Structure formats: C-alpha cells, structure tokens
Image: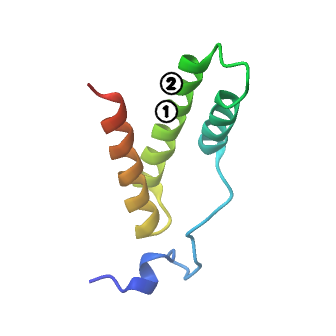
Amino acid sequence: MIRLGSFFRDESGRLVVAQVPNSALWVWLSATALRWSPYDERDAELRWVGAGALTVWALDEVVRGAAPFRRVLGVVVLAWQLWCFLP
C-alpha cells in the first residue's frame, strides 16, 4: 500500500505535484490562449493542436511520471481527452 506522502514524492523524496511545464504543455497552453483571442478563425485547428499536445503530455506522464500522483493525473487527463474526442 502506498502511503499518502509518497504518492506525491519522487524516488528521491522531492515533492513533485507541480513542475515547470514541458514542451507539450506549453503547446497546449499556447493553443488554449490563442483560442481565447478575438481572432478565432482558427478555433477548430487550435482545438485539435491543443488536444493533441495534452494527449502527448498525458501519455508522457503515464509512462514517465515522477510520482504515482503524476501517473494517475496522466491517466485522468488521457481518459478525459478520449471521452471528449471519441464519438
């Protein structure tokens, strides 16, 4: 059984709930910010780019997450992406 404290810590004991965003998360943040701009003629394309980037980020967390929390977060985000984009 995993103790709650170790759920949020990596192998060296560091707390890893929040980290500097990696490139996939920056792409998602940028696409989301651009969708909020008044020039929304590329809304559908930006939505797909953002969803793809978030899916890549989630898969990366599932495979290489530093702590169990990060891996579970990746599974939740991946499930959400599949729920939203599959018919």
Q: Residues within 10 Å of mark 2 (few under 14, many from 20)?
A: some
**Residue 35 picture location, percent across and down:** 64, 28
Measured in 3D between alpha carbons, the distance from the residue under mark 1 to the one under mark 2, in whole angstroms, is 5 Å
Q: Give the percent coordinates (x, y) of residue 66.
A: 50, 65
SS of the residue under disc 1: helix
Q: Quadrant of the N terminus?
A: bottom left
Residue on which the image places disc 2: 48
Q: Are marks 1 and 2 in contact (CB under 8 Å)?
A: yes
Label total for image: 2
Q: Is residue 67 above or below residue 65?
A: below
- Which residue is found at the position 46% from the left and 56% from the top? 64
Position of residue 63 in the picture relative to residue 27 (left or right): left
Look at 69% across and 36% down and name the residue there: 33
Residue 13 sits in which quadrant?
A: bottom right
Q: Quadrant of the C terminus?
A: top left
Which is nearer the eye, 56 or 77?
77
User: Which element carries disc 2, helix, strand or loop?
Assistant: helix
Say if 18 sits above or below 41 in the image: below
Q: Residue at x 46, y 62 (%)?
A: 70
Instruction: Tell which residue pokes out farthest to the front in this image.
Output: 38
Report the side of 60 relative to 29 (left or right).
Answer: left
Q: For residue 38, which numbered disc appears in the image?
A: none
Place of residue 62 in the rendered image (x, y in percent of width and height, measured from the top left): 40, 53
Q: Amino acid at mark 1?
A: Ala
The percent position of residue 71, horizontal first and vertical second, equals 41, 60
Residue at which label 1 appears: 51
Q: Amino acid at mark 2?
A: Trp
Foreground pick, 37 / 46: 37
- Residue 28 placement, left or right of 70: right
Task: Please report the residue visible at 57 percent of the width from the left and 71 percent of the height from the top.
Answer: 16
How dense is the environment of label 1, judged by Cα within 10 Å: few (below 14), some, or many (20 and up)?
Answer: many
